[in-house]
Amino acid sequence: MSGIFTHIGDIAENIPVITSDTKCEAVYRLFRSNPNLEGVAIVGAEGMPSLLMRARFFQQIGTQYGYNLYMGRPVELVMNNGPLVVDYMEQITDVSIQAMNRSEEELYDLVLVTSKGALSGAISIRRLLLAVADVRAEMASFMNPLTGLPGNRIIDDRLCQSYLLERFSVLYLDLDYFKSYNDSYGFKMGDALIQATADLLRQYFTVPEAFLGHIGGDDFIVILNHHEFRKDCEEVIAGFEELKREFYNS
């Protein structure tokens, strides 16, 4: 897709990084001097980053003996050793699912992002959810609103990709006399027929072997990564002959 971020690393923001032997007192000053700072990343000798969220830190030191217990001791005593860490190239939507599947206690923690094994940044849940909303809105603009199938922009991309394949087949499907049917039965019935046709095609042409797109109106396209299409086409035609009976008055 163009015009929108899809990789999680594209929306990552800088996050302060400290070492695991940093004293809690120093972290306390860091949080106090940066009221909007949600958390800090901790990098230890093993390389994988850990995380310390602001809320959890103040919760720890806010106990009866917490302040005196932790202030002079290293931050590794209170940090989260198992935060959600994702690679820069992971998809935003995939990361959002991982984030929402975390425990209740960690649900709103920052997500840490690495690139080639090194910490690249972090993402707040608010920023992540806003990005997911943007991705979904952008995806919707690429889909046919009637059938939910990929529309012309995605179809064009898939056709260009197919030229790189060793072999492929392109099937163009439309409904005979659809305009006459629309004129006789009305647009509502016509739309229902197109939706039913799309559902029928989905049964036979599914990824990864096939790509099914909706050009518009009663026109569909299928792109296959092989040449064995005759049997499926015959079954689709037979299925449609059965299906269309439901759309005529007896």
Image: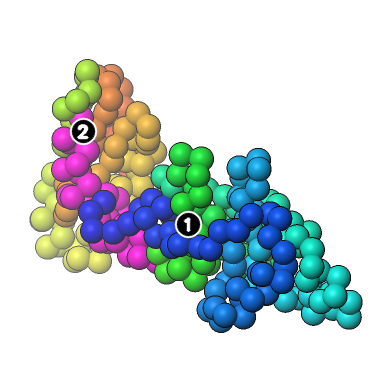
Query: Which residue is farthest right?
Result: 65
Coordinates of residue 250 in the picture (x, y in percent):
29, 55
Q: Is residue 227 above or below residue 104?
A: above
Q: Residue 227: give x, y in percent of width and height.
A: 24, 19
Q: Are marks 1 and 2 in contact (CB under 8 Å)?
A: no
Magenta segment main secondary structure? helix
Q: Is residue 62 above or below residue 74?
A: below
N-term-proximal mark, 1 vs 2: 1
- In magenta segment, residue 15: no
- The image position of residue 228, as x and y in percent, is 28, 19
Residue under circle 2?
161
Is 145 left, or right, of 156 in this rendering? right
Camera-side residue of 114 and 86: 114
Q: As drawn, is 220 to the left or to the right of 131?
A: left
State the residue position of label 1.
Answer: 121
Label 1, label 2: how far apart the Cα atoms are = 33 Å
Q: Tell me the kind of residue under disc 2.
A: Gln
Residue at 17% x, 50% y: name it.
152
**How many marks on residues?**
2
Residue 155 is covered by the magenta coloring: yes
The stretch in magenta equals 133-162
Residue shown at 17% from the left, 53% from the top: 216
Which x, y percent locates residue 23?
72, 64
- The image's mark for residue 181 is none
In the image, what residue type sits under mark 1?
Answer: Gly
Residue 209 location, quadrant: top left
